[in-house]
Amino acid sequence: EPLCGEMQPGLQGYRTNDGKCDPRGRFLVGTMLYTCDGTAGGLFSVEKDGSGYTTRQLVKGTTISNGLAWSADGAVLYYIDSPLKKIDAFDYDLDTGSVSNRRTAFDFAPYFESEGLDQAVPDGMTIDTEGMLWVAIHMGARVVRV
C-alpha cells in the first residue's frame, strides 16, 4: 500500500527516483519526468503524522533527483540533481525537516572534463564517518570520494 498519494497532482509522466530517510526518520524522495528532461521534478519529505503520512515539497524545479546524505549532526543535507553535475548543500532543520540556504558543495564539471567523461553525471551518494561524500558516477564507471 502506498504511503502517500500523488506527490505532484496534475503532472503527467513523472516518477520517484532516489530516496533516503533523514536522521529523524522522515523519508525524502525526489521526482523526475520519465523523459529525463525538464525541471518539473522536486524533492519531497514524507513523514508519519497522527492519521497517516504527510507529504511536503522541499525543493522545486529539479531534473533528475539523486543522491541524498546528511552531515553527522544532521544540520546539512547534501543533494544531487544529476544533470547539474554538482552536489548542493542545504541547511537542514532536524526539528521541522525544512531546507534553506542552497549552495554548491562540489562541482563535478571540471573533474569530468579533465577525465574525458563528457556523458558522466553524479548519481547515488552516501557519507562516511569523516564527513566525506562517496558518489557513484553514472556513465563514468567509478565511485569518487569528495
Image: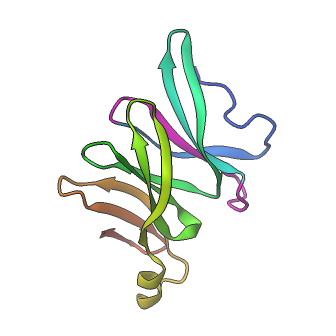
Horizontal side of residue 74 vs 37, given as left or right? left
On the image, the x and y values in percent for residue 73 come to 26, 43
Q: Residue at x 35, y 30 (%)?
A: 24
**Quarter in which the C terminus is drawn:** bottom left
138 over 92 or under it: above or below: below
Given residues 100 and 8, the one toward you in this image is 100
The relative height of residue 3 versus residue 14 in the rendered view (above or below) is above
The color scheme shown is rainbow
Residue at 55% across, 78% down: 119
Where in the figure is residue 47, as x and y percent of width and height? 49, 25
Q: Position of residue 63 (x, y in %)?
A: 64, 58
Q: What stretch is highlighted in magenta?
A: 23-39
Drawn side of residue 45 relative to residue 124, left or right: right
Which one is in front, 14 or 75? 75
Q: Quadrant of residue 53?
A: top right
Residue 59 is at least partly visible in this image: yes
Residue in view at x 58 percent, y 67 percent: 83
What residue occupies the far left of the structure in this picture? 130
Q: In this view, does 122 lie above or below 44?
A: below
Outermost residue, top side: 51
Tell whether 16 sits left or right of 6.
left
Q: Identify the residue at horizontal 66%, vertical 34% (top origin).
A: 7
The N terminus - image quarter: top right
Decide which of 75, 50 is in the foreground and name it. Answer: 75
Q: Give yes or no for residue 85 being in the magenta stretch.
A: no
When the figure is inspected, residue 86 is found, relative to residue 12, above or below; the finding is below
